[in-house]
Amino acid sequence: MKKFISILFTIASIILLTGCSGKEEARLHIAAASSLKNCLEEIYTEYQKEHENISFEGIYDGSGKLQVQIEEGLEADLFFSAATSQMDALVKEGYVDEESVVNLLENKLVLVTNSDTKVTSMDNLDQASTIAIGDPKSVPAGQYAKVALGNQYDSLLPKLSLGTNVTEVLTWVEAGSAEVGFVYKTDTMDRDVKILQEMDLEDPVIYPVGIVKETKNKKESTEFLAFLKSDAALKIFEKYGFKGV
């Protein structure tokens, strides 16, 4: 009987201690554009210094592909897009909480190379043998590139290599399998590529972030989103070349 009472006391103590800690573990799934991977990984580490009960799983890909995955039931707590169009679509369709959405960052589209190319800018881009861009159907960087190309787009189609995300495009250029390519300026940091030209787009490259309505971690997602908007997070974003909106 004494042994049984002792076991009950031990179990009760564990329950009491767990309850008093007030720290329920939560794993946040962040669906984010590929260009955000490096800075977000650092932000997760920084956030966990004060929130040991929170862990993260980053799901990185082209924003268009992530949009489709969320529509198809992807487990995600936050969506961090490289363009407003994908976010707007998910808000309209009822997948993302409109009130939570904030346009957080700005990036730049650049033309890059890693070879002794004759191309010096957009003015003589037609001299390139291969031009890598993200697929405009699903990759915001590709959509921005198509806009930047303007009237040249159709004539250059035979030379275009379409990537599934901006990271793939950067890898092609860096490896030399594409002579030039369009990527984000932030992607070029510490990579073996040279910027030939920075695009001056009429509509800036804006990165919005918002909470997915089906999140099972609404409180934790709201708190992490607040951190993403903080000065501490902005310093990390700026370290990777982003600019606050």
Image (cartoon, helix red, strand yellow):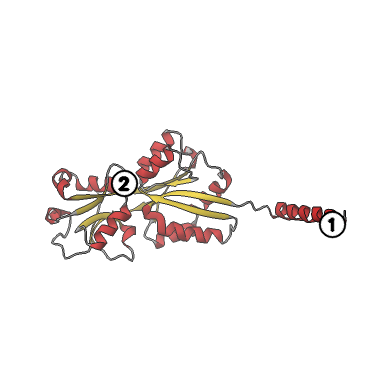
Q: Residue at x 33, y 66 (%)?
A: 190
Badge 1 density bin: few <14, some 14–19, many ≥20, Cα 10 Å = few
Q: Mark 2 points at which residue?
A: 139
User: Which residue is more in the foreground, 8 or 240?
Assistant: 8
Q: Where is residue 87 in the image (x, y as percent from the top left)?
A: 40, 41
Q: Which one is nearer the viewer's eye here, 176 or 202?
A: 176
Q: Is residue 215 above or below residue 118?
A: above
Residue 90 position within the rendered picture, expressed as x and y whole percent measured from the top left: 42, 37
Q: Place residue 168 in its image quadrant.
A: bottom left
Say what secondary structure mark 2 lies in: loop
Left or right: 45 in relation to 170: right
Give how far across and how far down residue 156 sits, in percent. 15, 48
Residue 6 coordinates in the image, percent (x, y)? 83, 56
Determine the residue located farthest toward the top in the rendered image: 93
Label of residue 3 in the image: 1
Looking at the image, which residue is at 31% across and 53% down? 166
Q: Which one is nearer the viewer's eye here, 138 or 7?
A: 7
